[in-house]
Image (cartoon, rainbow, N blue to C red):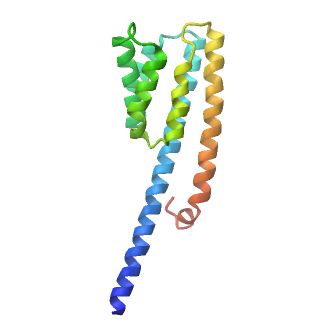
Amino acid sequence: MDIIKITGAAVVLMSSFMLGMYFVVVNKTRIKNLADIDETWRTISAEIRFQSGSLPEIFKRFASHEYSFGIKALYKDVYENMVVDSEKAAFDIIWRESVRNNASKSCFLREDEEFLMQFGNMPVHLDIQTQTDFVNHMISMLDDRIKKAQDKTDSQCRIYRCMGIA
């Protein structure tokens, strides 16, 4: 009878440990993907400022870059829809649909998905200063979101970090 109790306790401990590890990995992946989005938005801001290329060209480069699968898929989807449906759909519609279709591949929370959809409101047909101001505002909000996510992960993963795992 004692063997069954010990085995049951070991199973409970291992399952709670594995569930905790799962959440650590999901949170760290989410933060990395948000940081990748931050990097791409900074690049978009610079590309717009220096008029280095059109948005479809920028998104095509991001789709072939070494980002995670979900981020690459997002930018590939945006690029393909901008090239194919450029006259049928506006940028905001294309961006929102691409985020909706690809956010689940990137460990984003529902509130992250809603936040990312706001980037589709970028004024693509206005002057360069207005566009870069918009992108820079979105970047500052994203930086705040990343910092909050890191603080939350640090507080929740303390026990795993003590064990040398996280």
Quadrant of image for the N terminus = bottom left
- Note whether 134 is above or below 114 in the view shown: above
Residue closer to the observer: 103 or 54: 103
Q: Is residue 111 visible?
A: yes
Which residue sits at x=33%, y=12%? 84
Which residue sits at x=47%, y=15%? 91
- Note whether 157 is above or below 13 in the view shown: above
- Asked where in the image residue 132 lies, by quadrant, the reply is top right
Which residue sits at x=39%, y=18%? 79
- Note whether 2 is above or below 122 in the view shown: below
Q: Residue furthest bottom?
A: 1
Q: Position of residue 94 (x, y in %)?
A: 42, 19
Q: Position of residue 111 (x, y in %)?
A: 54, 39
Q: Is residue 66 visible?
A: no
Q: Position of residue 151 (x, y in %)?
A: 63, 50
For residue 58, side relative to residue 157 (left or right): left
- Asked where in the image residue 41 lies, by quadrant, the reply is top right
Which residue sits at x=61%, y=39%? 145
Q: How many marks?
A: 0
- Asked where in the image residue 68 lies, by quadrant, the reply is top left
Residue closer to the observer: 7 or 32: 7
Q: Position of residue 90 (x, y in %)?
A: 45, 13
